[in-house]
Image: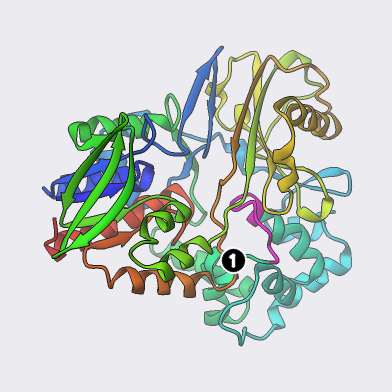
């Protein structure tokens, strides 16, 4: 038997993949529900997500999973208007340019910043193994482009400190393009041509979700696993003897022990560290060194008639140098109109992040007022909200700081010395849903080939 600790999307998709291969598994989840950060609230006609709002439809393994669960008919793609994205700079919103002519016309950067960004065509390749995303951006495109555009892009994914994030770990495609083509601009043009010749989508894919929200996927996975999921089971101890694992969990106040030939820890790094410390203190220390940021999601709904103008686009990001507590906002009702009543709009606003952790010290009311002030200033939204939801994630997104890939290699090497132990989840190789599902599919293949379980 294979024991999977953690019922987030990594653990669920792994359990599903193993079951499809005929492998016996037991999934242990400490909470009374599965899904981790994927959770959907439906109230007063609004559909609000607690964590991610969707996934890009470009990942084959995600599409295979959706097909296997019979959910293709429930997929809902974002509206075309979601391609319009904005960055807050110097007191107003600027649309992010999507083409060379648009880049030349944008007011996001001064003329000197635009000319320096084009200097990427002449910059030499990196000589160091790893560098921060800030260093990478400044070296390739200059200071103005780095602090405005590069920081905005990472904020939308990691909500991190780009002075600390690893360029290779967070945006490996950019590091690869630099090594292959020297110029990122030239590399991107060639990459698009390669994709078109191969018949692939030239873009990054469309943001996609399900009718009823992302919890539709979680529920389908849980239903398919049925009796192999044990909820409310907090694993409190792991031990290894004679090639077999003993897993002790606290279930409904009762200590329960299970045995398995293999154990997969699909939990956050800090939770894995706690379980592995008695077995390997150095491995636990490496896991503990993976930082997490704190993020609050503030979702607000308004009557459409109370807005001074229509809200269209994906949303906006606020780069760190602007000094705001609000990281940005997603225009949910513009992306997925069916997630709010037809006469209403819904915003998902994010506060906190790696460089603004003080925002999590605010009360719910203070967070709402902070977001309302931002919406008043930028979008002219002055009416009181008719819907609100505040969700706090004290440990939201793992931060792939400089040295992350080397740390992951040390973690996997140390875990390999404990027979039958594997670690997975978004703390290692990719923070998105697609990353987790793809990694789980690959792990299921490796476990199946190894014969364990």
**Residue placed under numbered mark 1 in the picture:** 401
Q: Quadrant of residue 229?
A: top left
* Whether residue 70 can be seen here: yes
* Whether residue 58 can be seen here: no
Element type where label 1 sits in the image: loop
Q: Which residues are magenta?
A: 154-163
Looking at the image, residue 406 lies above or below residue 49: below
In the displayed structure image, the side of residue 81 where residue 366 appears, left or right: right
Q: Main secondary structure of the magenta part?
A: loop
Q: Quadrant of residue 355?
A: bottom right
Residue drawn at x 53%, y 15% as measured from the top left? 43
Residue drawn at x 26%, y 33% as measured from the top left? 70
Q: Nearer the viewer, residue 230 or 344?
A: 230
The colour scheme used to paint the residues is rainbow
Instruction: Answer whether residue 153 is magenta in the image.
Output: no
Instruction: Answer whether residue 160 is magenta in the image.
Output: yes
Residue 164 in percent (x, y) is at 66, 66
């Amino acid at each position: 038997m294979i024991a999977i600790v953690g019922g987030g999307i990594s653990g669920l998709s792994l359990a599903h993949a193993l079951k499809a291969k005929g492998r016996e598994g037991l999934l242990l989840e400490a909470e009374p529900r599965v899904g981790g950060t994927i959770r959907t609230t439906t109230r007063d006609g609004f559909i609000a997500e607690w964590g991610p709002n969707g996934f890009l439809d470009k990942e084959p393994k995600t599409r295979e999973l959706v097909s296997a669960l019979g959910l293709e008919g429930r997929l809902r793609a974002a509206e075309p208007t979601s391609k319009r994205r904005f960055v807050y700079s110097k007191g107003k919103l600027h649309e992010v340019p999507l083409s060379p002519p648009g880049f030349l016309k944008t007011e996001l950067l001064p003329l000197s910043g635009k000319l320096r960004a084009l200097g990427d065509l002449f910059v030499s390749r990196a000589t160091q193994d790893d560098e921060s995303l800030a260093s990478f951006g400044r070296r390739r495109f200059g200071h103005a482009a780095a602090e405005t555009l590069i920081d905005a892009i990472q904020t939308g994914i990691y909500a991190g400190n780009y002075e600390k994030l690893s360029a290779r770990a967070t945006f490996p495609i950019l590091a690869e393009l630099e090594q292959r083509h020297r110029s990122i601009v030239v590399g991107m043009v060639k990459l698009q041509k390669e994709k078109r010749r191969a018949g692939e989508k030239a873009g990054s894919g469309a943001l996609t979700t399900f009718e009823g929200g992302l919890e539709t996927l979680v529920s389908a996975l849980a239903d398919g696993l049925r009796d192999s999921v044990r909820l409310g089971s907090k694993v409190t101890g792991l031990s290894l003897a004679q090639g077999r694992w003993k897993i002790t969990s606290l279930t409904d106040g009762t200590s329960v022990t299970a045995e398995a030939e293999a154990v997969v820890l699909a939990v956050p790094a800090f939770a894995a560290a706690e379980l592995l410390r008695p077995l390997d203190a150095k491995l636990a220390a490496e896991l503990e060194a993976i930082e997490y940021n704190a993020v609050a999601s503030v979702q607000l709904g308004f009557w459409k008639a109370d807005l001074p103008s229509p809200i269209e686009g994906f949303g906006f990001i606020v780069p760190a140098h602007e000094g705001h507590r609000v990281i940005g906002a997603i225009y949910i009702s513009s992306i997925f109109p069916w997630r709010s009543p037809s006469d209403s709009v819904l915003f998902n606003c994010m506060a906190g992040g790696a460089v603004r952790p003080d925002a999590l010290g605010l009360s719910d009311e203070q967070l709402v007022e902070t977001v309302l002030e931002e919406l008043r200033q930028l979008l002219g939204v002055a009416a009181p909200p008719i819907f609100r939801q505040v969700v706090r994630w004290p440990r939201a997104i793992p931060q792939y700081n400089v040295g992350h890939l080397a740390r992951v290699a040390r973690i996997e090497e140390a875990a390999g010395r404990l027979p039958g132990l594997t670690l997975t989840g978004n703390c290692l190789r990719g923070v998105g849903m697609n990353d987790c599902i793809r990694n789980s599919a690959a792990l299921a293949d490796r476990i199946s080939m190894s014969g364990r379980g």
